Image (spheres, grey):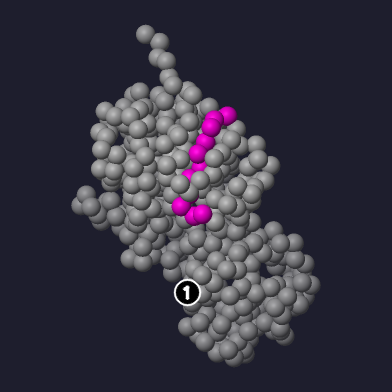
């Protein structure tokens, strides 16, 4: 018998942030979409064609058939619900499923017989079926697997990346049964030109997502530990990596601050679940400790250099270029640049912080950091280039030299400065 799938699905996307909005816009090119978010301000901005995350353009928004709404009742107009809400960690570095549970309550209150709910948010294996399904059932009064079904398709959105986008990245899909898997697969395949990979179970798909960034976290942790070792030996780590990188199978990872909503968060979801099933993960937790300590290590190196330059430490004029968690993106979530700010404050230094893309109000609200203009960066004992925004790459040797006082230094975390040209100008450049 030939399978006949319901391909006239109407999509709802719950959560219209860095992940959810590109998903909604992609589906909105060929499907009717309900774009739901609890943030009324966000909804009004999107209705006016403005995306402050800069993930989609005004033209892309205009071409998408999306009903932007903060009214849960509008979710009833859809029968294929995609959940793309944040999955952060709390202050104790434990998973915070609050947004997922909240989204499940909202969807559950509007759920109908025949609906499918697909979660994209990063979770530990088992969260979809063990944590979210009971909420969906309790709110709807329906039975999962009988009245509605669920799937999981992990997000692979890379904020600020205009090359690897939702439609051209291979999509992992899963469903609680074969029929659901087939529908989820065909719905996503209708917009994802790169194709789909069918995972055998929801837990496999959840596990695949959480190890993608755990792997990257551990590789960067190795580079960061090497930088600590080589610093004690007086060796430039980037020089070492460039030399080692001439071997065909050497992996091109670099040391640095590991922040953002994925790499520095996802491993804690895996370690949490691992301990729940009776295994304490040593390697993953060790890597997390190394990466979480890099802000302190960098500031200690900066202070040592200032002492060697005969600079007074307390009250010194220090600037940090870049506050977002990555380059060419306004995303401030879980930025580790704030670790630099806190470490400098421990030495009695209140750094000037500037960013080419970040929202000043968000920086103050979330981190207590008041962003300054680049013009304020002058006559500094030390300038830390923390984020490789294109605006900072475009600055000239004279621009950087003008930021410093006599015998002032630059610390280039991202390895973007023309070190030799600055050296000819008499400017010392430290690298991680």
Residue located 71% across and 80% down the image: 378
Residue located 69% across and 77% down the image: 377
Secondary structure of residue under mark 1: helix
Q: Position of residue 362 (x, y in %)?
A: 55, 66
**What segment carries the magenta color?**
30-40
Q: Is residue 193 above or below residue 344?
A: above
Q: Is residue 207 visible?
A: no
The 10 Å Cα crowd at callout 1, few under 14, some 14 to 19, many 20 or more, is: some
Residue 96 is drawn in which quadrant?
Answer: bottom left
Q: Position of residue 76 (x, y in %)?
A: 42, 36
Q: Seen in the image, is 239 located left or right of residue 71?
A: right
Q: Seen in the image, is 424 located left or right of residue 250?
A: right
Q: Is residue 254 magenta?
A: no
Q: Is residue 410 above or below residue 176?
A: below
Q: Position of residue 278 (x, y in %)?
A: 20, 52
Q: Which residue is mark 1?
A: 296
Task: Point out the residue furthest to the left here.
Answer: 278
Residue 200 is drawn in which quadrant?
Answer: top left
Residue located 31% across and 27% down the image: 177
Q: Is residue 31 magenta?
A: yes
Q: Quadrant of the N terminus?
A: top left
Task: Point out the residue furthest to the top here.
Answer: 1
Residue located 71% across and 83% down the image: 379
The residue closer to the viewer here, 128 or 10, is 10
Q: Quadrant of the C terminus?
A: bottom right
Q: Seen in the image, is 248 located left or right of residue 154?
A: right
Q: Position of residue 253 (x, y in %)?
A: 53, 54
The residue closer to the viewer here, 400 or 273, is 273
Please count the marks in the image. Answer: 1
């Amino acid at each position: 018998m030939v399978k006949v799938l319901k391909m006239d699905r109407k999509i709802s996307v719950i959560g219209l942030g860095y992940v959810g909005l590109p998903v909604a816009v992609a589906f909105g090119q060929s499907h009717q979409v309900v774009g739901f978010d609890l943030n009324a301000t966000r909804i009004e901005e999107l209705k006016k064609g403005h995306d402050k995350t800069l993930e989609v353009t005004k033209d892309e928004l205009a071409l998408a058939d999306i009903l932007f709404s903060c009214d849960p009742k509008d979710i009833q107009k859809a029968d294929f619900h995609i959940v793309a809400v944040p999955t952060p960690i709390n202050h104790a570095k434990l998973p915070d499923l609050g947004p997922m549970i909240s989204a499940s309550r909202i969807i559950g209150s509007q759920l109908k017989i025949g609906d499918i709910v697909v979660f994209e948010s990063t979770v530990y294996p088992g969260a979809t079926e063990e944590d979210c399904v009971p909420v969906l059932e309790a709110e709807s009064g329906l039975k999962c697997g009988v009245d509605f079904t669920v799937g999981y398709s992990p997000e692979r959105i890379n904020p600020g990346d205009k090359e690897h986008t939702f439609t051209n990245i291979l999509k992992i899909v899963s469903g609680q049964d074969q029929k659901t898997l087939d529908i989820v697969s065909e719905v996503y395949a209708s917009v994802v030109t790169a194709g789909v990979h069918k995972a055998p179970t929801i837990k496999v798909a959840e596990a695949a997502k959480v190890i993608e960034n755990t792997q990257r976290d551990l590789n960067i942790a190795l580079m960061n530990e090497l930088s600590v070792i080589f610093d004690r030996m007086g060796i430039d780590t980037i020089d070492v990596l460039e030399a080692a990188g001439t071997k065909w199978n050497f992996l091109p990872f670099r040391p640095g601050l590991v922040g953002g909503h994925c790499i520095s968060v996802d491993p804690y979801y895996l370690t949490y679940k691992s301990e729940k099933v009776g295994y304490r993960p040593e390697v993953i937790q060790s890597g997390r400790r190394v990466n979480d300590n890099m802000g302190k290590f960098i500031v200690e190196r900066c202070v040592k250099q200032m002492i060697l330059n005969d600079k007074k430490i307390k009250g010194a004029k220090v600037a940090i270029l870049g506050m977002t968690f990555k380059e060419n993106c306004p995303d401030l979530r879980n930025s580790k640049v704030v670790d630099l700010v806190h470490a400098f404050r421990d030495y009695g230094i209140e750094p000037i912080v500037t960013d080419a893309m970040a929202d000043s109000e968000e920086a103050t609200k979330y981190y207590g950091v008041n962003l300054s203009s680049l013009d304020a960066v002058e006559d500094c004992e030390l300038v830390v280039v923390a984020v490789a925004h294109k605006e900072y790459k475009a600055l000239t040797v004279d621009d950087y030299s003008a930021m410093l006082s006599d015998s002032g230094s630059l610390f280039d975390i991202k390895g973007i400065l023309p070190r030799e040209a600055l050296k000819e100008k008499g400017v010392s450049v430290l690298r991680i």
